Image (tube, helix red, strand yellow):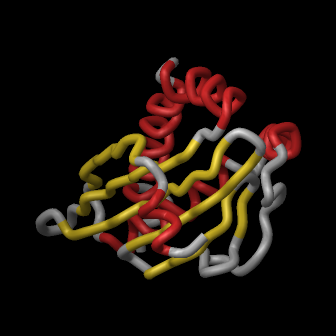
């Protein structure tokens, strides 16, 4: 999916946090948190169950265009600034964009924007199960917290 395809997806939400680390540390924390979140067998099983195009981690590390995680493919990686993941499965096509920017000395703002389309009756039901229940928002808050932890501890130079 290219940039035009991503912007054509309906906006779902955006979650923002300020991390007490520079953007380079947050970038490393982002990569570490994503790797850990999608490393387990559960992520691969879920990706298979819903028919994700990408079902396993692959490609270059640190993340670059073409890298993959279960359910996601990196379509853009601007180190320390932006990471764009896309994916698709039976019930949805989606994009998750992480943007980093300085927010003062030794601080960074991290934004995570989700866009997704849920076509047909099965897609509408999946949207209700994932978005309307608050499950997606809870997962995003958990992921941002994990990125914060990894950015301010292990990933510091």
Residue 110, x across and y down, in percent: 32, 57
The answer, for residue 73, to whether it is visible in the render is: yes
Please state the horizontal and vertical placement of residue 65, each as a whole percent of the image: 62, 80
Q: In the picture, which quadrant includes the N terminus?
A: bottom right
Residue at 26% over, 56% down: 20
Residue 74, image x, y percentages: 61, 70
At 61% from the left and 22% from the top, the residue drawn is 129
Tell me: 147 left or right of 92.
left
Q: Nearer the viewer, residue 5 or 140?
A: 5
Quadrant in the picture for the C terminus: bottom left
State whether residue 96 is above or below residue 79: above
Question: In percent of the image, x 41 and y 72: which residue is there?
Answer: 82
Q: Is residue 157 above or below residue 154?
A: below
Relative to residue 3, is residue 110 drawn left or right?
A: left
Point 28% across, 47% down: residue: 17
Q: Is residue 149 visible?
A: no
- Outermost residue, top direction? 133
- Quadrant of res 66: bottom right
Counting from the top left corner in percent of width and height, residue 117 is at: 55, 45
């Amino acid at each position: 999916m290219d940039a035009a395809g991503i912007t054509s997806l309906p906006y779902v939400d955006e979650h923002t946090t300020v991390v007490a680390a520079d953007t380079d540390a947050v970038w490393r924390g982002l990569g570490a948190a994503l790797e850990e979140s999608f490393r387990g067998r559960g992520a691969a099983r879920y990706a298979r169950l819903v028919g994700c195009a990408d079902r396993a981690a692959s490609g270059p590390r640190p993340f670059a265009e073409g890298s993959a995680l279960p359910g996601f493919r990196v379509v853009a990686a601007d180190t320390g600034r932006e990471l764009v993941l896309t994916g698709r499965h039976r019930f949805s096509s989606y994009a998750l964009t992480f943007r980093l920017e300085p927010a003062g000395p030794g601080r960074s703002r991290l934004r995570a924007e989700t866009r997704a389309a849920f076509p047909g009756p099965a897609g509408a039901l999946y949207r209700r199960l994932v978005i309307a229940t608050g499950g997606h928002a809870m997962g995003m808050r958990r992921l941002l917290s994990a990125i914060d932890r990894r950015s301010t501890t292990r990933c510091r130079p």
